[in-house]
Structures are given as C-alpha cells and as structure tokens.
Image (cartoon, rainbow, N blue to C red):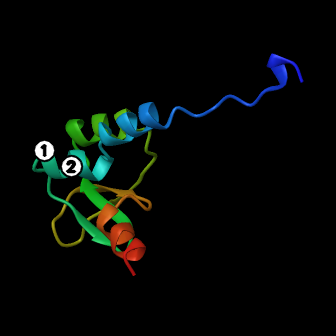
Amino acid sequence: MTDKNKTPKANISEDMKIIENSTSLFDDIVNAGIPYDNHYSDLYIPVTPKTTALLKKHGVFATTFTNQVEGGLWYDCFAAYIPYWAKKLNR
C-alpha cells in the first residue's frame, strides 16, 4: 500500500481543542444577553443587527415570523436550542 492510499489519522487532541473553544449560536445568544424563547428544539430570537451577525457567524439559516406576544420580527432557528438536545442526551 502506498502512502497516498493511507487514511489520514484524526488528531483527537487538536479536534477536542476546536470543540472546547467553540461556542454555539445558543451560547453566544445567552452570553450577549439577547432575549430568546423556544419550542422544543427550535430557538426563537429577535431580528436585530446583532442576531443577524450571529446567524451569519454560525452559518445558521433561519426563517422569520411575527412574534404575537413580544411583538416584532423574530428568527426561528431550527434545532438550535441546545438545552433541548442536552436533555435528550442525558436520558
């Protein structure tokens, strides 16, 4: 077998550093003090220049809706509410 046919080994140590230093969209929303809501795993956040920039930073596509309770335009971020997934993993 030649070198070009070998499967590269994953560098677990380096991969873990990337994961540990990463923040999710949800983490950034909480850390910025941005109001949010959720429905199951979907994260709802108001449409603002800051939230728009955070969506772009994380490469998240979101639809928008008019919030009937809070008012204004909000993003619906599919499956981005991390506490929902954390709870599912701990069952």
Q: State the residue position of label 1.
A: 32
Q: What residue lies at 33% left-to-right and 61% top-to-bottom? A: 82
Q: What residue lies at 10% left-to-right and 50% top-to-bottom? A: 33
Q: State the residue position of label 2.
A: 29
State the separation of the CA atoms marked 1 and 2: 5 Å
Image vertical order of residue 34 relative to residue 12, above or below:
below
Number of on-image labels = 2
In the picture provided, is 49 more to the left or to the right than 91? left
Kind of residue at badge 2: Ile
Is there CB contact under 8 Å for labels 1 and 2? yes
Image vertical order of residue 91 relative to residue 25, above or below:
below
User: Nearest the camera: 42 or 48?
Assistant: 42
Q: Quadrant of the C terminus?
A: bottom left
Q: Position of residue 27 (x, y in %)?
A: 24, 50
Q: Position of residue 73 (x, y in %)?
A: 27, 55
Kind of residue at badge 1: Ala
In the picture provided, is 11 more to the left or to the right than 24? right
User: Nearest the camera: 13 or 18?
Assistant: 13
Q: Position of residue 62 (x, y in %)?
A: 42, 51
Image vertical order of residue 60 relative to residue 26, above or below:
above
Q: Secondary structure at mark 1?
A: loop
Write down the quadrant of residue 87 in the picture.
bottom left
Write down the quadrant of residue 78 in the picture.
bottom left
Q: Position of residue 77 (x, y in %)?
A: 39, 56
Write down the quadrant of residue 88 in the picture.
bottom left
